[in-house]
Amino acid sequence: MNGIPNAPLWTRIAFSAMGVIAFAVFAYLGGTDFGGAAAFAILAISVAAFSRWDLRNRSYFWIIIFGAVAAHVIILTRIRWVLPHPVILVAPIVTLDFILIVAAICGAEQWLDGPAD
């Protein structure tokens, strides 16, 4: 996995700002629990995409990211969210979410591009 290990400071700030803005917008629209769930979903998808950014020129990368976004939108809008307190208890679920997205990207890479030389 190549990703972007030495991302510039502006990229890190942009990702942090995106999370804060997502939480604020979704908290305003649906309450703090919904805002938290949406921010966690955006975090999992964006970090997974960022970790495999070297595949951004492949169509399957964007198809998987779009599928993950669509699945999260469906899940977020169909469930009434009540996050546990402390919210850190959600960390294993967000981590599993991230792992599943990265596994889908890596699996597609292995299947479509073949094993690395």
Image (cartoon, rainbow, N blue to C red):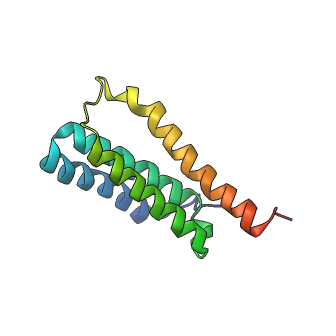
Q: In x, y percent, where is residue 20?
A: 26, 51
Residue at x 34% of width, y 51% of height: 74
Q: Nearer the viewer, residue 71 or 33?
A: 71
Taking 78 as reference, is 50 above or below it? below
Q: Is residue 107 left or right of residue 46?
A: right
Taking 114 as reference, is 87 above or below it? above
Q: Residue furthest top?
A: 85
Residue at x 31% of width, y 58% of height: 18
Residue at x 19% of width, y 39% of height: 32
Can residue 11 be seen at all in this image of the molecule?
Answer: yes
Name the quadrant containing residue 37.
Answer: top left
Q: Nearer the viewer, residue 32 or 73?
A: 73
Q: Residue furthest front?
A: 78
Residue at x 45% of width, y 48% of height: 44
Taking 49 as reference, is 31 above or below it? above
Screen quadrant of the C terminus: bottom right
Q: Residue furthest right?
A: 117
Q: How many marks?
A: 0
Q: In x, y percent, where is residue 28?
A: 13, 49
Name the quadrant containing residue 87.
Answer: top left
Can residue 1 be seen at all in this image of the molecule?
Answer: no
Screen quadrant of the N terminus: bottom right
Q: In x, y percent, where is residue 111?
A: 74, 62
Q: Is residue 32 left or right of residue 64?
A: left
